[in-house]
Image (spheres, rainbow, N blue to C red):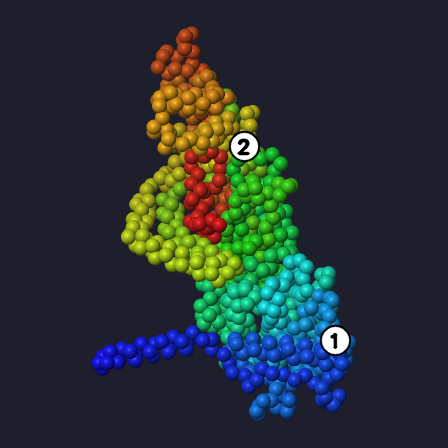
Amino acid sequence: MNPTRRLLMAHALLMVGLLLATAKPVHAKWPTINWVITEKPEKGGTAPTGTRATIAEEHRLTLQSASSWFQSMSFPAPYQINERGKFSFKDNERYLAYLRPDSSNPVSAHSSAGKMRLSSHESLLDPQTPNEHIYQAAAVHELFHGVQRAYPSYRSWADGANMKKLHDCDPGERANNWLTEGTASAVQIQYLERQNRQHLNHPFHGPSHIRWARTFDQPLHWPRLSEEQSVVLPAGVAPYAWQCSYGTWYFWYAVGNMLGSPNPLDTRRTSYLHHVFSQEGSWTDSGLAMVDLGLKYAAAKMDALRPYHGGLYALYPQFVAQYLDDDKFFEHVENVALETPAVYEFHSDDLSHIEPVATRAWRIRVQTPPVIASDAHYTVRFSLDSSDPAMKDALHLIVDHRLVSRPEDSATPYSQLRRIHPHLLDADGGIEYLVRVANVARNAVDTAPAEFSLKVEVEGFYGEDTSSGSLPGAIPPGFAITGPDPKWSCFGDDDARATYAFMTPEGVASQLERMLPQGLKNIEDDLDRAEMQAQKYSQAELERIQRHRRRFENSFDASVEASDVERKVARAAAEVRLETDSQIMVKLNGRNAAGTCDVLLVLTVPGEPAPQRVPPDNYSVNITPKSQVDAMTTAADFASRLDFSAMQTMSVDELQRISEQFQSAMQDYDNTEPDWLRCTTNMQDCEDGEFHLGEASYQHLFGTFSFQVYKGDLELVPGTAEHPREYAEVSGHINITSTQEDVDNHLLDFLSRPSGLGDMLQIPSLEAFMQGGSMFGK
């Protein structure tokens, strides 16, 4: 073999060796995984007998299994004495644990001296109650305490005599217990799930063996509050666990599912804790800073999904969104009932701010009216704000199971729109939302008690109190248009459905510039949600989604680059800013003698919208009555059942039959009466009228108008007996208040709001470009 070939072969063998080496899991080497269980030294330290021997054997088998499991996940050997009472091992020595002499006590313990005392309660052999089922793995819980103490920096802090007791907690509680007991409890539950190959319910999610629970209004890292400060216990919850360190297991359990996998057999859901406890540095107070660093490090080392990078800033809000989905997880839930339209605002004070790494909750119920005046779906917007930018960055808005993404443009309100589709309503015509606000900063230890405001807008537009402004007389709330027939009449009072938007040069340009970066962010958020959802099914499903994502992103990035879209958007925005006129667009939904009606009002004004008289050529009023909407619905339904490709080869007779079928379907909507038409400025004998605009701001729009309409042939002499011409008056007013602000994407909201078939300005796809929007939907 020539030297070059030998060199290539050697290189190939080296690479094969490296691959084989890295393919094997790297395990921490424990001195032993074997155990011996004896009576306590004061009881002679002898081997148990009778039933106690059987209990000891159950514990031994559990500890041996758990030791092998922990070792496979590269946890260090526990801080645990051996059968000589030492921490150093010789030959085939085993770890030592003691049976507690009192067989009536079901509790086990692990001490700072590395000594484990295990319950001798007979229920271990035949568990009956939920607690007894969980206590079958109590030895795993205590062994994990030994593993925790194997990390020197953590042990010196956690077992230190100066460990703080925070916030008037119970005398027995220490500041580290949220971490020490919470993680040990989570690991105990994960072990049982692994052994049984099935998940265990949280007690707030249905029948469960678990009796550890807490509320999360209280900061995550606070231990149990003293008894006089504790809340009323929910049924079936263990008193010593309530609002307590043990109840925090649910957070650590959820983090394991997020950073690793929900699969009970996947060791990553437990092994991530190694990165938390192995942090070297200043463990102080409750350990929050080091936990935060550890979770950031774990996400990076484990190549976790993108939304889970960032420590507690990323993981805690996702935990609230995905897991704290019931009112019972919160001590105080604000119940709010809203009708349509309505607005609810909550402003915190010194007594209602959100503590660090804690959550506030609201149950919002929106009740739709029994008789809906329009086919348009209702809109609900949730907005979160704070006067302090640092506090605002630490606040997280969660609606139901969705953590609302922050807007790409920081000047845009942190909000999300929800459309109320009819199929989402309950039997009483209402819909409920569980809204939460979480408070955790990018560096969790820097989180301060947060002042904030939460606003919930149903529709966001509503009738105003009687106003006059710059116009003579008073204008009633809502709107009214009165004309000669239903096609020129529509009414709505102070609860009228309405929306309006301004199309100013600067406003349109700025929203154009926001659309692309916000749309790209929404795509990224959609893909992140797809991965998070896939992870809950299986690793194979996650990998499949990730392959699709890579292909999509490669193709999408190439198409965006080839399209030169950023430059085109910038050029379009620059051109829009050169315009000198603005438009005011108004949609109104009301009723008339024939049923429901929709109104589209458009005004064109010079410069920025302001009080003025708008000439007749610069405003239009279009009313779509129910009969016209019904006709359009029928036509659309008929068209949806046609095979247009087959029509290309049809005979004349076949096409004639289709035409007759269409005419038959539309016969109920035939109208032989001529329509009333609006007079124009070039008609000498007809008043074209003006629009008196009293106020035009983002918060308030009102004004009055009047003009004439005619019926008849304009080409002939007016008023002849053969062709008589008729005239009628159309007059109206609008007086609408809005909760929108000038920094909102109000134009995108206006154009994307669901409306009737007669709405020619509706562009539903624009909603995908708004903050908190979705490019792909579900």
Q: Which residue is mark 1?
A: 121
Q: Which residue is mark 2?
A: 590
User: Is label 1 in contact with label 2 (beta carbons under 8 Å)?
Assistant: no
Q: Please identify the residue farthest to the front as the structure is shown.
A: 1
Q: CA distance from mark 1 to mark 2?
A: 72 Å
Count neighbours of disc 1 (C-alpha within 10 A) and say few if under 14, some if 14 to 19, many if 20 or more. many
Residue 265 in view of the camera: yes
Relative vertical location of residue 510 with respect to residue 65 in this rendering, above or below: above
Residue 306's spot in the image, x, y percent? 45, 63
Residue 196's spot in the image, x, y percent? 62, 66
Q: Please identify the residue farthest to the top as the structure is shown.
A: 721
Count neighbours of disc 2 (C-alpha within 10 A) and say few if under 14, some if 14 to 19, many if 20 or more. many
The residue tagged with tag 2: helix, strand or loop? Answer: strand
Tell which of 312 and 478 is nearer to you: 312
Q: Report the amino acid beneath label 2.
A: Gly
Q: Report the amino acid beneath label 1.
A: His
